[in-house]
Every structure is written in structure tokens, then in C-alpha cells.
Amino acid sequence: MKLNLTPTGKKTMKNYLNNEIFCSNEELESINGVIRDTQFFIDTQCARETPMHWWKESYIEFILTPKKEGLEKYIKACEFKLASFKKQKPSVGSGVSDVEIARAKEVPIGSILGTNKTMIKCPLHNETSASFKIYTKKNRWWCFGENVGGDAIELLCKMNNLSFIDAVKKLSK
């Protein structure tokens, strides 16, 4: 069943999904940190075959790992739903290939903005404090001030008012 939404409804749903993805990624980073810290504690502080060693390993295996896997599935589901709201990418014969698109998406966002920081003032609007987060591992960005985000192509489109094809061509050079 296809759901027909008004433009406002679509924008609301996109913002909701983007927020869910962002919050879930933050929680996932937190869980990964707890797993790392717990594993480090096990490796350095716990004698093998002690109740503390067993308890910590069980905590990772039976509590943290399933939660991490569930979050990863939820993020993928949100990203899949969000993709249905995005404008269709150009088809074959539009002037850019899938290889060029992939290459353009790999351009580090920090290099586009000329920074190695992960939290900066948003280049898309005037502001007094940093609200633009760069996720270097996934090469994605999010502006908390505007509630928008995306990849390198979307950033260049928004910054320079370019079409998708022009942004891909500029980034894949």
C-alpha cells in the first residue's frame, strides 16, 4: 500500500527519519565504546575463568551485541524508508555513471569544507555557534540548525546551488 503524503507530511517524515538515524548512530557509537571499554577491562584486569571475567564476556555477548545488531538493522530500515523520499537519481544516459557517483560520494566532506574538525559552523546558513556535524567514518553530515544532512554530493548541491549531475561531475574530477 502506497502512502500519499502532502509536501509538509513528507518533510516531517524525512526530518523524523533523519533524526532517528542520527540518534541511533549516536547510541551505536556509545555501545561500541562500552564494548571496547569492557573488552579492555577483561583483557587487562580480569583473570581468566573467574566469575568477573565470565560476567563481563556474557554482558558483551548477550546484552550489548544484540542491542548493537538491532540498532544497525533499525538504521538500515530508516535509511531505506528515507531513500523512498529522495528525488530519483539520474538514469543511465544522464551524463554521469555509477562509478562517478560512487567516486563523488567518497570525497571527504572535510576536504570540501577545508577542515579536519567534526563540529563546525554550518556553511549553509549564518549562525553564531557550531551546529554542523561531520561523521568522518560514514562520510556524512548533519546540520542541527536546519535539520538536514546527507553525503558529499548533497552538500555540494546545497552549498553551490548545483544540480545533482553538476555536483557529481565537480566532485569526481
Image: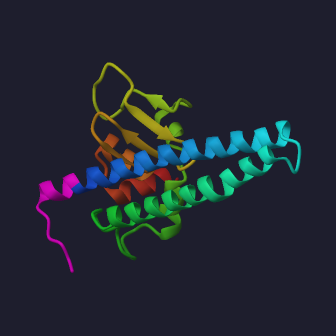
Spot occupied by residue 108 in the image (x, y as percentages of width and height)? 54, 45
Spot occupied by residue 166 in the image (x, y as percentages of width and height)? 37, 55
Residue lying at 41% horizontally and 45% vertically, measured from the top left = 23
Q: Judge left or right: residue 101 versus residue 32.
A: left
Spot occupied by residue 116 in the image (x, y as percentages of width and height)? 56, 31
Looking at the picture, does residue 19 appear above or below residue 68? above
Look at the image and say whether residue 4 sits in the magenta stretch: yes
Residue 145: quadrant of the picture = top left
Looking at the picture, does residue 87 appear above or below residue 53? below
Residue 38: quadrant of the picture = top right
Figure disc tally: 0
Residue lying at 43% horizontally and 66% vertically, measured from the top left = 96
Q: Is residue 112 visible?
A: no
Q: Is residue 46 visible?
A: yes
Query: In the depicted view, which residue is nearer to us: 7 or 54?
Result: 54
Q: Judge left or right: residue 84 versus residue 107.
A: left
Q: Quadrant of the N terminus?
A: bottom left
Look at the image and say whether residue 7 sits in the magenta stretch: yes
Query: In the depicted view, which residue is nearer to us: 32 or 89?
Result: 32
Spot occupied by residue 156 in the image (x, y as percentages of width and height)? 38, 46
The residue at the far bottom in this view is 1
The residue at the far right in this view is 48
Query: In the depicted view, which residue is nearer to us: 4 or 57?
Result: 57
The residue at the far top in this view is 128
The residue at the far front in this view is 51
State which region is magenta. Answer: 1-12
Residue lying at 83% horizontally and 43% vertically, measured from the top left = 43
Q: Judge left or right: residue 171 versus residue 85.
A: right
